[in-house]
Image (tube, rainbow, N blue to C red):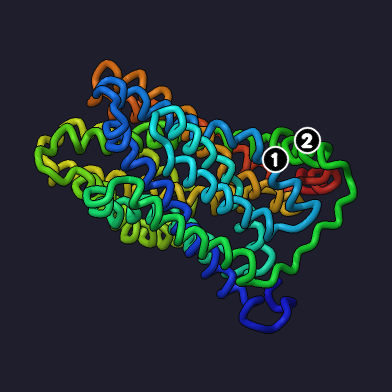
């Protein structure tokens, strides 16, 4: 608990939350910029329009797929030694990836750089685990909401700020600015707060990795909830890389980077409005209820960009859709933390992003096949992918409710029946 933390700014839970929120904002902003401006950069590398459509989805999938198998390793290293250097490791991976992308002169080296970004996965779960131990229990929901809202906001505000830079200097110019910011974040994570956790586990590292995976696999409610989160956000993850192509299909001007940044940036601004409103509704009417309603709205909203005929209409439609989905994305982490057994909550939360990471690896690959036929079909296809997730979430909800129901002892049952 926070009252047991040593005094001082570097040990304050508010200070740690601030560092993690800024780091998450820069992290997501960098990811968002690479997603938003990769199609333009692929054109600059000499690819044809059809090749750009195909490689946009495949490179996006590769960015996530390479790093997912290493997620258990990062959690085990943090449990064995310390969380702080493992969190800092993710931003060092960004720096290395940025160097490869900066010097890439063909699509394959650029794709290698994008794939190296996946070695940054796993930092958010470790940040949330750290916050769980430091933040007062009655403030955990607020802390999670603040930190997890930074990701969707950064994912879209990053392109909004980066669009004019790309139009003026190209993606390589933007990368130089990003690397400077990420270097500052790396130093802040490494030295900006006091990590009071020191691993005491003495098991072999490989055993800890396997045990971490088994914690999720052996819990039916956590396993089903992971599956539900994966399916609900699969369509959204598939659509994200193709929003820039939807913009360039409609835009006829000379500043496509700025146009892309505005469209996806409005989605981030919508998240800043809809996210807190959804959190307040969840506190009043129940987190699960708001999650179900938001998922149903996602099914209705995801097909709508197909009807956009102008940049302003696409901006409005996508802003509302992304704002709603981003809001329930943040809410899903609170639901997961509530549902995880207390004794294994820290380990479960270290895998919190695994369902959406898996969706980001699979969704764009599926979308690339659909986009190869017709780009517009990506949007209704995303809604169809989202719909089954509501049913899986309903199953997870029943399992969570059943697990939390009080157990009636036989003697008590006999007494009540008598």
Task: Please tell me which residue is depicted at 53% across the width and 65% down the height of the picture.
Answer: 143
Q: Position of residue 273 (x, y in %)?
A: 31, 60
Helix or strand or loop: what does disc 2 sit on?
A: helix
Left or right: residue 237 compared with residue 138: left
Q: Badge 2, how many Cα within 10 Å: few under 14, some, many 20+? A: few
Left or right side of 276 for 288: right
Q: Is residue 239 above or below residue 282?
A: above
Residue toward you, 400 or 228: 228
The quarter holding residue 244 reads top left
Q: Are marks 1 and 2 in contact (CB under 8 Å)?
A: yes
Q: Which residue is drawn at the image coordinates 55% and 68% (left, top)?
A: 17
Q: Is residue 305 visible?
A: yes
Residue annotated with mark 2: 210
Badge 1 is on which residue? Answer: 72
46 or 60: nearer the eye? 46
State how far apart marks 1 and 2 are (Cα): 8 Å
**Label 1: element kind:** helix
In the drawing, does residue 307 fall left or right of residue 77? left
Q: Which of the pair 77/378 is nearer the observer?
A: 77
Q: How many marks overall?
A: 2
């Amino acid at each position: 608990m926070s009252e047991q933390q040593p005094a001082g700014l570097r040990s304050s839970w508010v200070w740690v939350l601030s560092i993690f929120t800024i780091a998450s904002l820069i992290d997501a902003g960098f990811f968002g910029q690479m997603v938003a401006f990769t199609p333009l950069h692929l054109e600059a590398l000499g690819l044809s329009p059809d090749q750009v459509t195909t490689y946009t989805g495949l490179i996006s999938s590769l960015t996530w797929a390479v790093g997912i198998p290493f997620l258990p390793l990062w959690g085990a290293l943090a449990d064995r030694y310390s969380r702080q250097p493992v969190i800092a490791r993710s931003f060092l991976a960004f720096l290395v990836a940025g160097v490869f992308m900066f010097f890439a002169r063909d699509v394959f080296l650029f794709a290698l750089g994008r794939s190296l970004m996946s070695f940054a996965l796993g930092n958010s779960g470790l940040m949330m685990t750290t916050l769980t131990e430091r933040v007062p229990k009655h403030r955990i929901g607020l802390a999670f909401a603040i930190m997890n809202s930074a990701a969707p906001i950064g994912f879209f505000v990053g392109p909004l700020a980066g669009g004019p830079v790309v139009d003026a200097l190209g993606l390589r110019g933007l990368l130089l600015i990003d690397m400077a910011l990420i270097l500052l974040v790396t130093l802040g994570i490494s030295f900006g707060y006091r990590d009071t956790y020191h691993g005491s586990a003495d098991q072999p590292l490989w055993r800890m990795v396997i045990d971490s995976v088994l914690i999720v696999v052996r819990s039916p409610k956590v396993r089903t909830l992971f599956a539900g989160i994966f399916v609900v956000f699969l369509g959204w993850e598939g659509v994200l890389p193709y929003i820039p192509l939807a913009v360039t299909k409609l835009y006829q001007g000379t500043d496509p980077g700025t146009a892309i940044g505005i469209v996806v940036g409005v989605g981030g601004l919508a998240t800043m409005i809809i996210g807190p409103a959804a959190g307040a509704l969840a506190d009043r009417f129940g987190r699960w209820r708001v999650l179900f309603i938001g998922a149903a709205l996602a099914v209705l909203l995801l097909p709508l960009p197909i009807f956009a005929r102008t940049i302003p209409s696409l901006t409005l439609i996508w802003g509302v859709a992304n704002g709603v989905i981003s809001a329930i994305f943040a809410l899903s982490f609170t639901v997961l933390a509530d549902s995880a057994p207390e004794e294994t909550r820290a380990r479960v939360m270290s895998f919190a992003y695994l369902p959406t990471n898996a969706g980001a690896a699979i969704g764009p690959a599926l979308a690339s096949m659909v986009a190869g036929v017709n780009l517009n079909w990506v949007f209704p296809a995303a809604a169809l992918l989202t719909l089954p997730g509501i049913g899986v979430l309903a199953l997870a909800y029943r399992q969570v409710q059943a697990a939390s129901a009080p157990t009636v002892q036989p003697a008590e049952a006999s007494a009540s029946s008598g």
